[in-house]
Amino acid sequence: MKALSLARTMRRRIVLLALPNILSNITVPLLSLVDVGLAGHTPEGKTAIGAVAVASGVVSTLYWLFGFLRMGTTGFVAQCFGAKDLKQINQHLAQGLSLALLSGLLLFMATPLVSLFVRLMAQDQLAIAASAQLYVSIALCGAPAAMLLYVLNGWFIGMQNTRIPMIGAISINLINIVLSALFVQIPGWGVEGLALGTIIAQYVGVLLLGLLAVWRYGRVLRHFCWRDLFRLRRRKGYFSTQRDLFIRSALLSAVTLFFTYASTSYGEEVVAANTLLLQFFHLFSYFMDGFAYAGEALTGRYVGMQRRDLVQILVRQLFSFGWPLAVLTSLLYLLVPSPLLHLLSDSPEVVAVALSWVPYIAFVPLLGFAAFLWDGVFVGATYARGLRTSMLVASAFFFGFYYLMRASWGVAALWISFDLYLAARGLVQWWLWRRYTPKLTNL
């Protein structure tokens, strides 16, 4: 009876933490669609669309590499929350903010290098290259704010609160859309207006989350010491954790970028079709990320409480949500892919090519859901070495299988490599967790 009650309580906590993140994730593609739509209505037209696609893609990938700031903050703060250590909660916030500001300033200083990379990405399209470089030069002014948002969101999640990050994300996206729509109307402003709207929204978001932190956690933040912002302490495992999380993010980005790069060698229709099919993966990830964030917060909390039994219950309940969702999504993708594909593209040729590869994307939820959930558990336990190791093995599977089979199987080799990569992540993490679990009582 007690076990049943614990399971019900755990499921309720998972849902309460997962839903706000899922809702905020849904606004992400809306922002991208609006940006492309606004770019298309500027005097530059196609040039602006191409510039925004190239520049925003590079900036987003660059920012994504620093996702370790959020993950590391979440794991450490959640453990301190479980241990009821207010001093450490504040010190991890200060340390995270310091690293965020330093990272943001370094990214801003790297603007000339990023601009050069964007120029190379645009290849022979000189007009697109010029507009993309202009976009980057403005967008990277928001790098400090983007890094601070990572840490603030991570801190809230560690404090078992995903509602405030949801409010922040939706507010930032709405402000971005409104300002961008206004700025592109100004004569002479095209991609500049879109970039400016983005960075203003980011800085407003930092201010909003800061105010919400003081309003909601004023008593906790009374222990905050401003001098800690200028002290990068060598806490046990802190920098090694952030290093391993960075390596994991870099490998994940490498696989994602290579998938698109490899697609280009098969022609325009294959690139377009694979891009559409990857939206199926992203759609599934929006939901699974919600449960992963819940796993981060709760795993860290129970590790901090030294409750190995609750961690084990949490893992079982996370997977009780994950596998039914994966099965339903796979069946949906396999049986009725056409409506979504036609919603994303009005090109019969591209849709036809995409339909021929649907079975491969249909397996992605089944093979990949475990990797998402284990990511959350590992982040909460600050077991970054395990995340790094699993990504190294999975990346080796991806690149190794593709280069071994591409001559014989072509595009199929690319998709099978992606499926194997996701499956390998989940399997390796399961194996590592079995070895790591006995150590939980000694953390």
Image (tube, helix red, strand yellow):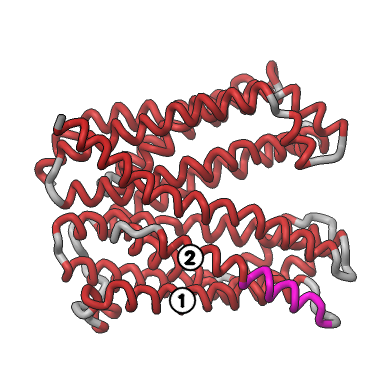
Q: Amino acid at mark 2?
A: Ile
Q: Amino acid at mark 1?
A: Leu
Q: Magenta segment, which residues?
A: 175-186
Reply above or below: 188 against 121.
Answer: below
Q: Quadrant of residue 88?
A: bottom left
Q: Quadrant of residue 412?
A: top right
Reply above or below: 403 against 21.
Answer: above
- Residue at the location (25% across, 35% down)? 7
Indicate which disc, 2 or 1, sits on the residue closer to the N terminus: 2
- Residue at the location (79% across, 69% down)? 130
Disc 2 designates what residue?
Answer: 167
Q: Which of the two discs, 2 and 1, sits closer to the camera?
A: 2
x and y, in percent, of residue 10 in the image: 27, 41
SS class, disc 1:
helix
x and y, in percent, of residue 71 in the image: 37, 54
x and y, in percent, of residue 99 in the image: 37, 69
**Residue 177 covered by magenta stretch:** yes
Disc 1 designates what residue?
Answer: 208
Q: CA distance from mark 2 to mark 1?
A: 9 Å
* 367 displayed left or right of 32: left
- Residue at the location (55% across, 69% down)? 171
Q: Is any part of residue 173 visible from this angle?
A: yes
SS class, disc 2:
helix
